[in-house]
Amino acid sequence: MPRKVAAVLAVVVAQNRQLSDKMETVYLGLGANLNAPREQLNNAVLALQTLPCCEFVGVSHHYASKPMGPQDQPDYVNAVAALKTTLLPEQLLDLTQRIELDHGRVRKEERWGARTLDIDILLFGEQIINTERLTVPHYGLTEREFVVYPLLEIAPNIKLPTGTKLQTITATLALNELQQLPL
Ligand code: ROI
């Protein structure tokens, strides 16, 4: 386990009383468009598989996607991973942010600019979360084909906390050249 993840784990364990007693299924959006993006995603999955208080469930195929936002940046590779966890949402956020930083992410990069690795908490069980650090469901979830289609691949019947079936969103969501990549 990387030293920095171990350090965050030590804090989580020290604060054990803050762990939820509920196991939640969490979906994470992964994205990268710099420094061998597919490798970035594979390494992120390896790191997610070692997280404390988490059981890794699976990951979608990789998808090549056109950049949302400024077009003067490389195409992205996106995927969605699923975990089960007893961590609280912000504890999981601490750990995913640590993985981003360990993989070369510079936190102050240009808004909507190119990035080495992005890990977004898309859904956390059926929780609706609005804190300074975290908005769940992720604010862009239903508008981003590179999130919706990989998520549906691994959770075809998933519903948003509002009860809407994600599948119904695909009727009005353009594919925008999204391409499933071979394994
Ligand atoms: N565009 C695509 N296609 N995929 C992403 O993961 C992604 N991430 C971002 C912005 C800059 C909004 N554009 C993206 O953060």
Image: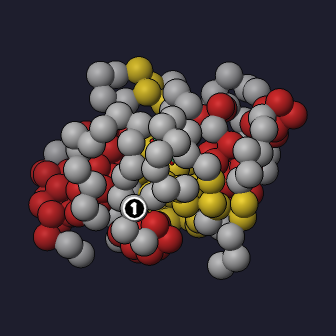
Outermost residue toward the bottom? 183
Q: Position of 104 compared to 30: left or right?
A: left
Where is residue 3? Give x, y as percent: 14, 70
Residue 60 to residue 109: above or below: below
Mark 1 residue crowding within 10 angstroms, few (<14) / some (14–19) / many (20+): some
Visual colour scheme: secondary structure
Q: Nearer the viewer, residue 51 or 180?
A: 180
Confirm whether residue 65 shows in the render: yes
Q: Nearer the viewer, residue 105 or 87?
A: 105
Where is residue 178? Give x, y as percent: 71, 53
Which residue shows up at 78% across the image and 38% down it?
174
Which residue shows up at 51% across the image and 35% down it?
69
Q: Position of 88 compared to 64: left or right?
A: left
Where is residue 122? Give x, y as percent: 53, 40
Confirm whether residue 22 shows in the render: no
Residue 2 to residue 105: above or below: below
Quadrant assignment for the C terminus: bottom right
Q: Secondary structure at mark 1?
A: loop
Q: Amino acid at mark 1?
A: Leu
Quadrant assignment for the N terminus: bottom left
Q: Which residue is mark 1?
A: 34
Q: Nearer the viewer, residue 70 or 36?
A: 70
Which residue shows up at 30% across the image and 38% down it?
110
Q: Nearer the viewer, residue 19 or 39?
A: 39
